[in-house]
């Protein structure tokens, strides 16, 4: 009777090892080809019983090598051998910044926000930042695509031409997306390497298109650049916001570095209503911002607390929400003079100028030192409210058109690429200066032309056309917050 290969007491070490491995792999459900290989090898080893010592040793080495390879290739328990899918080399676990200003690693630059923007050929994402102008170096975009890193792409850095001589200036960085990238976040690198990405701060990419969603949910957004210092002009702020509301504004975006306690109280009430969107703006934690617009008169690292950056950021923030964006300061009101609201104004202007994306509104100063002599709007309930009562100021300067005269703007955000304070720097389409009899800026402030006497000023009572609703609305807001003096 023939001996069983498996039961023989003289079974070789090779046979024994191959048998053990076969039983171990059977428990792990190996691929049929591997099982057949071991069965054949087990049988073949029995035929090698009479081989010399050196052949057996060589055979054992080959067997161990094959088994090592098999164990590294075989999958966990499954219905068959399925190689494990190899994913991207790195998985990005974004350190998502919660700040509105983020330092860029290995530079002195600051990043603010990122938006999808495919209006410039060859690019997909625009990053808005504040860069040290004499230290701009090549940069590389790194994307987080569906949770994975997707390589680097060279960036195009676009410093804004307006910086008023300050060391830092508003800067855009354009990035091209990799193919098939469902991007969620982006950051910038100073080298095209992804070896050390553990401590990068990732900026969320906004303005991504959402299917089935009506993007333009608002007609008008007002962008108020920067609040700073102890500004506490509660009465004028409340009057301006309520005037915006009467004119048809849907939302007011304010970049807040700091303000007085009373104004903070007022603004929080508007935030709760949803009329005001407050964007924290802690720029003074990163640099020494100037309190003025001209470096020769006000030292600092950047113009007017980063005003240029905030205006551009607000345009992109509103691009997929608002049909029009108004770029003006809080003490300014863009006022239609032939229409009762902004929508009627633009419904008239836009069809006449279909290619225009930037409408320039002439600035007119109402010196705050001159008051309406009748005193009819010197209201007793407002006496204890800090700030200026714009209804009392009816005298308007004529601009000196022999020197540079500033404008403010109503823009279609999708037609603007870069803006300054008084004009758009890069845009698609045309600009149009709106005649002053159609619309002008009411700007209650210190006199601009201080040599003019009262007799040389124009009487302008346009705000009085809204007096009844304006006073009622302001009383409602201030009364709710406890600012009003009780009427006798």
Image: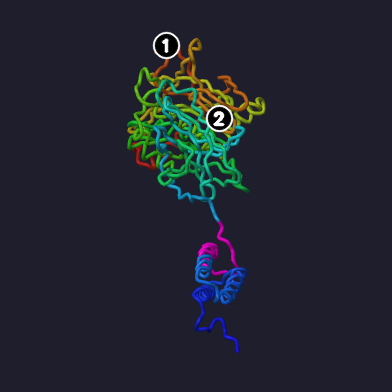
Q: Is residue 475 visible?
A: no
Q: Closest to the observer: 116 or 176?
A: 176
Q: Identify the image quadrant of residue 343.
A: top right
Q: Picture coordinates of residue 296 (x, y %)?
A: 37, 17
Q: Identify the image quadrant of residue 383.
A: top left
Q: Closest to the observer: 161 or 122?
A: 122
Above/below status of 59 relative to 180? below
Question: For the residue labelled by badge 2, is the local secondary structure a helix, a strand or a loop?
Answer: strand
Q: Picture coordinates of residue 289 (x, y %)?
A: 36, 28
Above/below status of 182 relative to 26? above
Disc number lying in front (2 or 1): 2
Left/right of residue 167 with respect to residue 416 in the rendered view: left
- Quadrant, the C terminus: top left
> What range of the chain is rendered magenta?
63-85
Residue identifier under label 2: 417
- Quadrant, the N terminus: bottom right
Residue identifier under label 1: 452
Q: Closest to the observer: 2 or 402?
A: 2
**Label ID, residue 92:** none
Q: Is residue 188 magenta?
A: no
Q: Farthest residue toward the bottom?
A: 1
Q: Is residue 220 visible?
A: yes
Dot 2: few (<14), some (14–19), or many (≥20) neighbours within 10 Å? Answer: some
Above/below status of 36 relative to 440? below
Q: Picture coordinates of residue 348 (x, y %)?
A: 64, 28
Left/right of residue 444 with respect to residue 71 in the rendered view: left
Q: Picture coordinates of residue 445 (x, y %)?
A: 41, 22
Q: Earlier in the sequence, mark 2 or mark 1?
A: 2
Dot 1: few (<14), some (14–19), or many (≥20) neighbours within 10 Å? Answer: few
């Amino acid at each position: 009777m023939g001996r069983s290969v498996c039961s023989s007491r003289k079974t070789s070490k090779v046979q024994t090892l191959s048998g053990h491995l076969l039983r171990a792999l059977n428990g792990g459900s190996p691929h049929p080809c591997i099982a057949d290989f071991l069965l054949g090898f087990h049988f073949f080893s029995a035929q090698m019983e009479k081989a010399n010592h050196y052949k057996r040793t060589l055979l054992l080495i080959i067997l161990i090598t094959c088994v090592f390879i098999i164990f590294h290739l075989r999958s966990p328990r499954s219905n068959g051998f399925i190689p494990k899918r190899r994913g991207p080399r790195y998985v990005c676990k974004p350190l998502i910044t919660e700040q509105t200003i983020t330092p860029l690693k290995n530079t002195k630059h600051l990043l603010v926000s990122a938006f999808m923007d495919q209006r410039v050929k060859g690019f997909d994402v625009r990053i808005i930042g504040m860069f040290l102008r004499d230290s701009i170096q090549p940069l590389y975009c790194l994307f987080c695509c569906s949770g994975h890193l997707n390589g680097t792409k060279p960036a195009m850095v676009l410093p804004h031409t307006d910086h008023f001589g300050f060391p830092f200036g508003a800067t855009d960085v354009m990035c091209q997306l990799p193919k098939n990238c469902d991007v969620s976040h982006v950051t910038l690198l100073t080298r095209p390497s992804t070896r050390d990405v553990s401590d990068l701060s990732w900026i969320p990419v906004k303005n991504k298109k959402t299917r089935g969603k009506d993007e333009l949910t608002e007609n008008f957004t007002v962008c108020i650049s920067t609040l700073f210092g102890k500004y506490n002009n509660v009465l004028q702020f409340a009057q301006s916001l309520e005037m915006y509301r009467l004119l048809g504004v849907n939302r007011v975006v304010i970049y807040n570095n700091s303000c007085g306690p009373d104004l903070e109280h007022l603004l929080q009430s508007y935030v709760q209503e949803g009329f005001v969107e407050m964007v924290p703006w802690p720029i003074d934690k990163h640099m020494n911002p100037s309190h003025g617009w001209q470096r020769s008169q006000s030292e600092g690292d950047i113009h007017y607390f980063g005003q240029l950056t905030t205006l551009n950021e607000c345009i992109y923030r509103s691009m997929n929400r608002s049909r029009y964006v108004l770029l003006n300061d809080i003490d300014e009101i863009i006022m239609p003079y032939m229409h009762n609201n902004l929508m009627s104004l633009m419904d008239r202007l836009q069809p006449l100028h279909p290619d225009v994306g930037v409408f320039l509104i002439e600035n007119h100063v109402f010196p705050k030192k001159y008051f309406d002599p009748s005193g009819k709007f010197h209201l007793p309930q407002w006496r204890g409210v800090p700030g200026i009562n714009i209804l009392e100021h009816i005298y308007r300067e004529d601009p000196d058109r022999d020197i540079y005269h500033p404008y403010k703007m109503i823009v279609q955000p999708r037609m603007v690429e870069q803006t300054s304070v008084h004009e758009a720097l890069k845009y698609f389409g045309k600009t149009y200066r709106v005649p002053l009899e159609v619309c002008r800026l009411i700007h209650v402030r210190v006199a601009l032309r201080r040599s003019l006497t009262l007799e040389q000023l124009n009487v302008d009572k346009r705000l009085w056309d809204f007096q009844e609703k304006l006073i009622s609305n302001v009383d409602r807001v201030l009364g709710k917050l406890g600012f009003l003096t009780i009427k006798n």
